[in-house]
Amino acid sequence: MPGRRPRLQPFASRQPASDGRPVGFQGIIAIWLGASLASLSPTAAPPAWEKTVTTLPRGDFPNPRPFVATYNFGWNDLVAATGEIQFDKSANRLQFQGVGQTVGIARALWKFDVHHRAVADAETLRPIEMSQVEERRRKTVTDDLLFTADGVERTRIDSKTNKRSALKTFTFPGGVFDMHSALLYLRSQPLREGDVYRLVVYPATSPYLATLTVSGHPSITIAAGTYKAIKLDVQLYKIGKKLELEPHKKFRRASVWVSDDADRLLLRIEAGIFVGTVFAELQSVRFRL
């Protein structure tokens, strides 16, 4: 297409995993990217929801400083996966890179590796492009997203066919976030108790409406230490082809804690889903100059 920006090149290998069934990135590793996900219970959809979407510009809270962080992911009391997150700034862009893999018993049952890369504008915090590679049992699936001022374009490559899918588009006036840019935008806001934000988010394959409410400022103790935190609650709906809202069928309830300090790191997420409780928890963080 003439005039289009070049697509982001994934940094991951595209060789398929040797065995195991897939564990979706949105189901485990992307829980970190979805720091806004907190209370996903099915409630009544807001009327004329398009008019309720938050249109505020980015907030005054400074952008994150570069860091490397590690997380554990799992369900109930079982650690099923680990991940490493790298966040950097280059010129006027903010770049997020994440790698994750199943471990231990979970990996013996199904081998799964995921690589995620996303870029956002450092001034506006709007998404630019995203690439995600999932290495599954018998194939590798790559999703490439290119964001525009009022929407997103997606293509997919499946190693079974080795063909790029037809271009899929989603348009929404005011723009669409990916998970990385949604987190950046939210952490830039004041996040006072009772504040509500509604965002249209396109994590990888479908659009969602996320309604986020700041519910408190408690303290929380996790593997990485004890932090004063900001707790968020969220309602999540899938957006249909005709912009109708559909309740999320898998997520039931969740809570998220973000550090209430100059870094606003994601500390922990607990989410009730159809197979039990899944979690993501910060294990370590190292800030870079």
Image: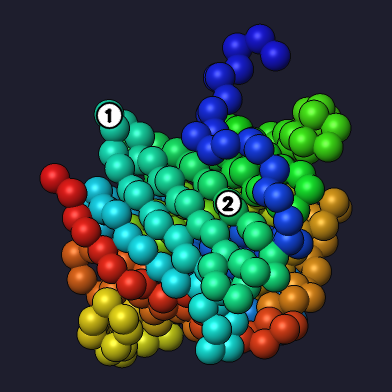
* Residue 199 image point, x, y percent: 56, 59
For disc 2, the marked residue is: 114
Occupied quadrant, residue 50? bottom right
Q: Is 143 above or below relative to 277?
A: above
* Residue 270 image point, x, y percent: 52, 82
How would you rate the neighbour count of disc 2 (Cα within 10 Å): few for under 14, some for 14-19, many for 20 or more? many
Depth check: 265 or 114 in front? 114
Q: Quadrant of the N terminus?
A: top right
Residue at the far left in the pictured view: 289
Left or right: 281 as drawn, with respect to 278: left
In the image, what residue type sits under mark 2?
A: Val
Depth check: 157 or 52 in front? 157
- Residue found at x 32% / y 60%: 69
Q: Is residue 51 visible?
A: no
For disc 1, the marked residue is: 91
- Residue found at x 53% / y 46%: 116
Rounded to the nearest angstrom, the CA distance separating label 2 from label 1 is 27 Å
* Residue 89 image point, x, y percent: 28, 39
Numbered-mark total: 2
Occupied quadrant, residue 143? top right
How would you rate the neighbour count of disc 1 (Cα within 10 Å): few for under 14, some for 14-19, many for 20 or more? few
Q: Earlier in the sequence, mark 2 or mark 1?
A: 1
The secondary element bearing badge 1 is classed as: loop
Q: Is 190 above or below relative to 124?
A: below
* Residue 240 image point, x, y percent: 82, 57
- Residue found at x 65% / y 69%: 108
Q: Quadrant of the C terminus?
A: top left
